[in-house]
Image (cartoon, grey):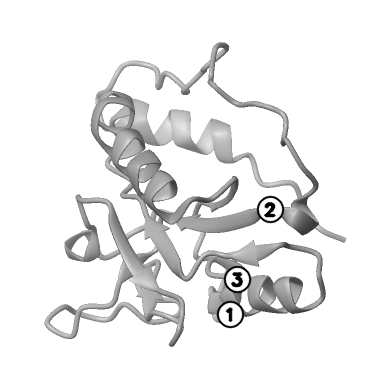
């Protein structure tokens, strides 16, 4: 039987132990989301991820690697989907006790989206993915990263995005 893992409470306790005031979770009541104008099967879709590009010059970034702050990235990037880019999640503070992170397809579902396009479930899968950093700053995300990601979405002429946070 699976046991519930209280991520929110763990996050609050983590920040409190660091001496920070209570963590303010992002809340966007007025986010500019809109209903899709046409079915997904007729839409061009992009993948947005928070996984980081692999860097040979850094310590272990592979599956189950310890938290590696050096692997963080701070600028929005794009990468072609073919070949599937080598992106990793060692820079993310996830529950390494309960998640081995051995299957990169869980945070970078490029193959699944290519298959969805071939099966007609997605009209077209954009030929580039968009990487957005996890800077732990709502202000940076709102003022810098989100507008840059939007510019890439517009350049790619996508009508929908799949956000896969890690």
Residue 62 x %, y %: 38, 82
Query: Which of pointers 3 and 2 indicates the residue nearer the eye?
Result: 2
Say whether disc 3 or disc 2 marks the residue closer to the N-terminus.
Answer: 2
Q: Is label 3 in a helix, a strand or a loop?
A: loop
Q: Residue at x 16, y 78 (%)?
A: 58
SS class, disc 2: loop
Q: Nearer the viewer, residue 95 or 125?
A: 125
Near-viewer residue (28 or 12): 28
Q: Do the residues labelled 2 and 1 touch (CB within 8 Å)?
A: no
Residue at mark 1: 103
In the rendered view, tell whether residue 41 sits above or below residue 120: above
- Residue 42 versus residue 142: which sits nearer the camera? 42
User: Toward which corner of the image does residue 52 lie, by quadrant?
Assistant: bottom left
Q: Which mark is in front, 2 or 1?
A: 2
Disc 3 from disc 2: Cα separation: 18 Å
Q: Residue at x 57, y 12 (%)?
A: 29
Q: Where residue 151 appears, x then y in whole percent?
A: 34, 42
| Residue that extends furthest to the right in the rendered view of this protein | 1
Q: Real-space Cα distance between discs 2 and 1?
A: 27 Å
Instruction: Specify few, some or many for label 3: CA neighbours under 10 Å numbering under 14, 14-19, or 20 or more.
Output: some
Q: Which residue is drawn at 54% across and 21% down?
A: 32
Q: Residues within 10 Å of mark 2 (few under 14, many from 20)?
A: many
Q: Looking at the image, is mark 2 or mark 1 earlier in the sequence?
A: 2
Q: Would you name the residue on which mark 3 appears?
A: 109
Q: Position of residue 75 (x, y in %)?
A: 21, 51
Which disc number belongs to residue 43? 2
User: Disc 1 to disc 3, how far (Cα)?
Assistant: 10 Å
81 shown above or below 94: below
């Amino acid at each position: 039987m699976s046991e519930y893992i209280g991520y929110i409470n763990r996050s609050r306790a983590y920040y409190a132990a660091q001496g920070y005031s209570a963590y303010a979770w992002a809340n966007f009541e007025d986010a500019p989301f809109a209903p899709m104008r046409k079915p997904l099967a007729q839409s061009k879709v992009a993948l947005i991820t928070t996984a980081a590009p692999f860097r040979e010059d850094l310590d272990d970034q592979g599956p189950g690697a310890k938290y590696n702050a050096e692997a963080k990235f701070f600028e929005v990037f794009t990468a072609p989907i073919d070949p599937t880019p080598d992106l990793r999640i060692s820079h993310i503070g996830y529950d390494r006790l309960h998640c081995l992170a051995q299957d990169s397809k869980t945070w970078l579902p490029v193959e699944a989206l290519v298959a969805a396009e071939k099966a007609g479930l997605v009209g077209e899968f954009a030929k580039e993915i968009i990487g957005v950093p996890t800077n732990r700053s709502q202000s940076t995300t709102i003022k810098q990263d989100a507008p840059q990601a939007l510019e890439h979405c517009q350049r790619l002429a996508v009508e929908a995005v799949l956000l896969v946070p890690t």
